Every structure is written in structure tokens, then in C-alpha cells.
Amino acid sequence: DGGITQSPKYLFRKEGQNVTLSCEQNLNHDAMYWYRQDPGQGLRLIYYSQIVNDFQKGDIAEGYSVSREKKESFPLTVTSAQKNPTAFYLCASRRQGGTDTQYFGPGTRLTVL
Amino acid sequence: AQSVTQPDIHITVSEGASLELRCNYSYGATPYLFWYVQSPGQGLQLLLKYFSGDTLVQGIKGFEAEFKRSQSSFNLRKPSVHWSDAAEYFCAVGAGGNEKLTFGTGTRLTIIP
């Protein structure tokens, strides 16, 4: 069954700790994306990667880091430098091509206590 | 830079009534336009998309949208809503290569019996 997996669904961390959110896809998609969603603000792009071992900052990259060592995996680390990390995080992927669509995972809700 | 405006934060509709959700975009060239739906605590599901050709686009779940270049709009419509349509709806615009999407802030749809 093909799709995008994000784990865990809920994540709790203490302030000052780094935390890594997982995103895996078995769709053989080239591009992967991380978005942050806050109430009333829609989705904002954190990082994206169009190819293995390469990634670009999105609109709100400060306090976040990513890696893309494998085509199917694009983990996001929320560092202690992120001032307001509590949010819903969505991962997406897309097959490279001008008219292809981004498909989304189920999301991870991160709460920093 | 591209942008998307969804002027209605919250809409309430009676079950069986028609629905129109508004979306206005700003983009210099021909945009790629999308409508996604999100149930609470879930990821986003693609309803429909417009890249070129016929300006009236049919999607899943009985939804359609019309691209109007002169009005920079891509409004979503459904002739008769069902209780299961209650969700949040996001309009998004992509650049030519569709590497990055810009999302609107969303419209929350409530259905009353």
C-alpha cells in the first residue's frame, strides 16, 4: 500500500530539547516537503528537497534542520532554537514534473511543554 | 511572489444546500491551482487541480472549480453538500515548475442539519 508515513502522530517534548519528526514515502517520489500548520495561518513551507543529498530553505526555516540521505526519507529536526515549536507538522512528496501534485502525510502534532 | 487569499474564514451551510468557497490568487504567469481538504487532525487530500485547458475542473466528492483569469479567482463549488463535507478547505497556487506551493489560510466549513 503506497503512501506517506509520518511518525509519531503525537509528540511531546520539554522546552530546550531537540526533536526529530519522521517522514517516509514509498511512492518513489523525487521531491519532499515539510510544512508547519498553525490555526488560522494555513500551511507554511519549512524545507524542501528535490533530490537526494540536496535541500532548500522554505519561508520559515529558522530553528529547523533536515537531511535527505535516502530518496524515501526526509526527517525534520526541530531544534531548541525554534522559539515556538508547538504546531502541526505535515510532510508531502511529489514526483518531479511540471504538472505533478503534492501528496500529504497524516501529520505529527508536536507539543512542547 | 505568489499569494493566495481565502476571504471567508468560516462558512456555515445547511445540508443539501449549494456551496461556493472563494479563492483569489496573485501570480504573474499562468498559475497552477489546487484545492485541498483537511479533516480535523488529518493530512490534506487533493480535491482538484488546474494546470491548463478547460477552465471548469471536476474533482472528487462532487466538487468543481472554475478558473477565471480576469478575476484571478479559482472558486470551489458543490451543488449539494453532505454532512461529511464538514472540514477545512485550502486553496493553493504553484509556480511553473510546481516545486513550491503557497497556501491560503483556509476556510472552515460547518454543515447544519
Image (cartoon, coloured by chain):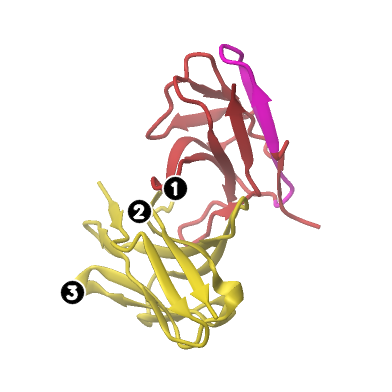
Chain colours: A red, B yellow
> Which image quarter: residue A108?
top right
Tag 1–tag 3 contact (CB < 8 Å) = no
Callout 3 amino acid:
Ser
Asked whether, in this view, residue B41 is left or right of residue A2, the answer is left
- Would you place residue A29 above or below residue A80 in this image? below
Q: Would residue B97 be seen by someone viewing this image from the given angle?
A: yes
> Which image quarter: residue A15?
top right
Q: Which residue is mark 1?
A: B99
Q: Which residue is mark 3?
A: B70
Q: Which residue is mark 2?
A: B95
Which residue corresponds to the image point at 39% horizontal and 63% vertical from the top-left? B10
Q: Would residue A31 be seen by someone viewing this image from the given angle?
A: no
- Would you place residue A48 above or below residue B20 in this image? above
Using the image, name the chain to which the residue with label 2 belongs: B
Asked whether, in this view, residue B92 is left or right of residue A108, the answer is left
Q: Position of residue B36 (x, y in %)?
A: 50, 62
Callout 1 amino acid:
Glu
Tag 1–tag 2 contact (CB < 8 Å) = yes
Which residue corresponds to the image point at 51% horizontal and 76% vertical from the top-left? B112
Q: Which residues are magenta?
A: A10-27
Q: How many numbered badges does the structure rendering display?
A: 3
Q: Residue furthest left?
A: B70
Callout 2 amino acid:
Ala
Q: Residue furthest top?
A: A16
In depth, the one of A32 and B91 nearer the eye is B91
Neighbour class for label 3 at 10 Å: few (<14), some, many (≥20)?
A: few
